[in-house]
Amino acid sequence: QVQLVESGGGSVQAGGSLRLSCAASGYTYSIASMGWFRQTPGKEREGVAAISADGSTNYADSVKGRFTISQDNAKNTVYLQMHNLKPEDTAMYSCAAKGGYYPGLRPYDYPYWGQGTQVTVSS
């Protein structure tokens, strides 16, 4: 099993920045890709950014140029640096992990999930 724990969420004004962290533990050798996803009430979960173990990345169009995903393999941790935040970025952000090296953004491809961390952006 893989356990994922997110941190770094909070409240910020529009234009501000936040950095989310996701620490993996357990059978981390089975992880080939990790991603960040977000969800608001009444909407489907959407992929935000993903990264593979070899460093390949993938971003949703809505966050390109504003968000950056990175990883520290020694710490089994993935980060999501978010700049120029907008009110529409408000959501519960969750990290997820899977085997397979393609850093996809489809939630149902990911079997392991963290509990999530809330990001709230006020105008």
Image (cartoon, rainbow, N blue to C red):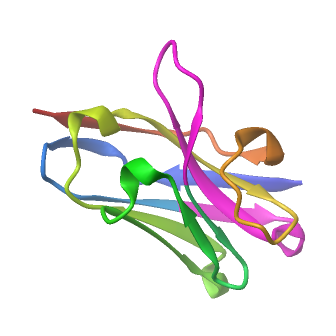
Quarter holding the N terminus is: bottom right
Q: Name the residue nearer the viewer: 5 or 42.
A: 42
Query: For residue 89, which quarter of the picture?
Result: top left
> What span is in magenta?
22-48
Most extreme residue toward the top is 42
**Is 19 contained in the magenta span?**
no
Is 96 on the left-hand or right-hand side of 61?
Answer: right
Q: Name the residue nearer the viewer: 86 or 4.
A: 86
| Badge count | 0
Q: Name the residue nearer the viewer: 14 or 77.
A: 14
Is 30 on the left-hand or right-hand side of 51?
Answer: right
User: What percent of the width, then of the height, locates residue 90?
Assistant: 33, 34
Please report the residue visible at 59 percent of the width from the left and 31 percent of the height from the top: 45
Please report the residue visible at 65 percent of the width from the left and 87 percent of the height from the top: 74
- Work out whether 85 lies above or below 92: below
**Is 37 contained in the magenta span?**
yes
- Work out whether 30 lies above or below 115: below
Please report the residue visible at 13 percent of the width from the left and 43 percent of the height from the top: 14
User: What percent of the width, then of the height, locates residue 29?
Assistant: 87, 75
Quarter holding the C terminus is: top left
- Work out whether 123 lies above or below 51: above
Please report the residue visible at 82 percent of the width from the left and 56 percent of the height from the top: 2
Most extreme residue toward the front is 61
Is 91 on the left-hand or right-hand side of 109?
Answer: left
Query: For residue 46, which quarter of the picture?
Result: top right
User: What percent of the width, then of the height, locates residue 38?
Assistant: 51, 38
